[in-house]
Image (tube, rainbow, N blue to C red):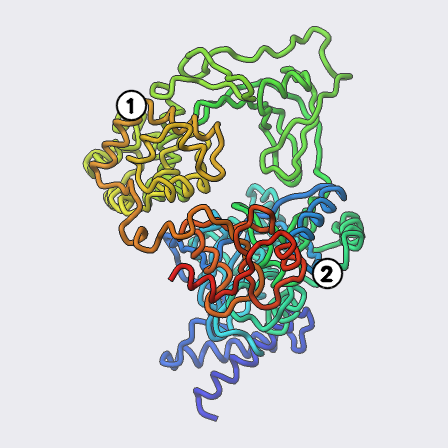
Amino acid sequence: MTTEERIHSLRDQLREHNYNYYVLDKPVISDYDFDQLLKELQQLEDENPEFFDPNSPTQRVGGEVTKNFETVAHTYRMYSLDNSYSKEDLESWEKRIKKLVDGTVEYTCELKYDGASMSLTYEKGKLVRAVTRGDGFKGDDVTTNVKTIRSVPLHLKGDYPERFEIRGEIVLPFEGFAQMNAERLEAGEEPYRNPRNTASGSLKLQDSAEVAKRPLDCLLYSIKGEDLPFSTQYEGLQKAHDWGFKVPEVYKLAKNIDEVLAFVNYWDVHRHDLPYETDGVVIKVNNLQQQEELGYTAKAPRWAMAYKFKAEQATTVLHTITYQVGRTGAITPVANLEPVELAGTIVKRASLHNADQIAKLDIREGDTVFVEKGGEIIPKIIGVDFTQRDPDSNATTYIETCPECDTELVRAEGEALHYCPNAQGCPPQIIGRIQHYISRKAMDIEGLGGETVALLVNNNLIANYADLYELTKEDVLPLERMAEKSAENLINGIEASKQIPFERVLFALGIRYVGETVAKKLAKEFKSIEALSQADAETLVAVDEIGERIAESVVAFFDSEKNREIVQRLKQFGVQLEISAEKLANQTDILQGKKFVVSGVFTSVSRNELKKLIEDNGGKVSSGVSGNTDYLVAGENMGPSKRTKAENLGVPIISEQDFLGMID
């Protein structure tokens, strides 16, 4: 056997033993024998560097240092999940599903593991990239660190696709977490608070050798790609296992919501027997074609639902109520609490939402309160222990002036929140608007973070986001912790933001109620900031899904002379304030005012491409057939109920080729 053949043989043996030990939990050789094989391979690789392989088992020990984690766009967006808390929630979800798809609907039930979400990309059976969830659109490339996790296969086996992504959670088992804390306590260091945050923090360590020392695990459960060799989520889990991935052992195929609830109820009790943290169950429509038919909302898939286990509660004392000012001027009351442990974290603050909530629960300073951490990240107060109340306590009087600039607060009719109207002179609003402008989903300015924005404002270098484009390296160098390279990156990041497309710029402006989805609709409808600024409320409301509240907010924004001046400056600096000519060239009004329902499997273009073609040509895509539907585009294997409903309502049923002919 040649040296090269021996190296390949050792790599194959070690991968198989690694799979047996870390994935199947069924080792067939001793740790000593494994180490001897690894040592032999390491020596041969050192002596023969021409046979280096970045995915060799010897690379698991880490050692590579990453100073900056590159931001990478996800090929397939990583969506959030909608939450449910009761049988009624699940039954309502099932009713919505059955209105939108035909045939029998089955579900896969999987435990919801509490870890750090991860997307792994494989090409030709080799791991090429590992990216954190980030904001769902982009995440951080942490490949070097993830390669040190023994249960992540570096090479696959079996009939895997040429290229695909697989999603899951990086978790820290309870046993490994306890071991890490025991070592920290012995060294006189503070213990880690909970496994989830420790797992997430591990992925951003700069030295991968340090990550390799941590007993992290990786549980994978969702495959994304083209022409996948399975047709259901359940089969996908089995395939992932066959290819060498560590798939959670606990999952079940359920025929109805009653079977789903039986799974939920069992694991609500027995989850404490598991080696990992779990906080609920994820229920998915099993059939992938039905998943595609159901599609997504702006934030979550319609075909999946997270059922959250009962929230954890704690009792503590509310010391003071303080008030925060947001970028829109909204006032948020905050309860400052006696620190208490809740769901693995120390809670010191909780949201009180608004004046009505405080009055409704009669919350007062000095009260003993019940704090809950459920589906929300921020804990909330759900009640007061009146038996512990001081008889001399006074009811809470909500503030009348801004805690930052002393301006009298306003509360519009029908609004839950109080607002500070001093938009141009209230420091948190000024800083907040600029922080929103530079954020990842908006202008995504590299090298500029929220703390730096605050420093720039407090040092009188900027007062609004247009001022960013007049900054020089010499302006920012004197700032705290600002080195030469950091200053260059900041200025370069601001310059690069001039290429961000119009719909994201529109979102970045921070117009109240104009989120990502609304910004896209407005950009598509008006095509330039000039046209949008001249639209009145009536014109805006005529745009699909734009209500009066949004329309009035947009008009009010452009009625402000200060806002118009800032927008004009952005235009002069070269920020994209209209849809690019290239993008306009791909859009028409051929289908203006027409509503389409898309159903079935298509051959010339994918379902998503078909929907994009409809929208790019002025049409609208709906999920269900109704009297307002203009066309049903029917692919192969379309459900019979949609066809029947379309025929009964007289809705024209057209083929994929008929549709493509309409826009040709």
Whether residue 248 is situated above or below residue 517 in the rendered picture: below
Q: Which residue is mark 1?
A: 562
Residue 537, x across and y down, in percent? 41, 28
Question: Is 578 situated left or right of 392 in this image?
Answer: left
- Residue closer to the observer: 166 or 560: 560
Return the mark for residue 104: 2
Q: Earlier in the sequence, mark 2 or mark 1?
A: 2
Residue type, mark 1 in image: Lys
- Picture quarter containing residue 37? bottom right
Helix, strand or loop at mark 1: helix
Nearer to us in this view, 36 or 222: 222
Q: Is 313 on the left or on the right of 211, as rendered?
A: right
The residue located at (26%, 41%) in the rendering is: 575
Residue in the image at 53% along x and 56% along y: 118
Percent x, y of residue 46: 40, 77
659 above or below 406? below
Q: Nearer the viewer, residue 276 or 623?
A: 623
The C terminus appears in which quarter of the rendering?
bottom left
x and y, in percent, of residue 334 in the image: 56, 23
Q: Secondary structure at mark 2?
A: loop
Q: In the image, what residue type sits under mark 2?
A: Thr
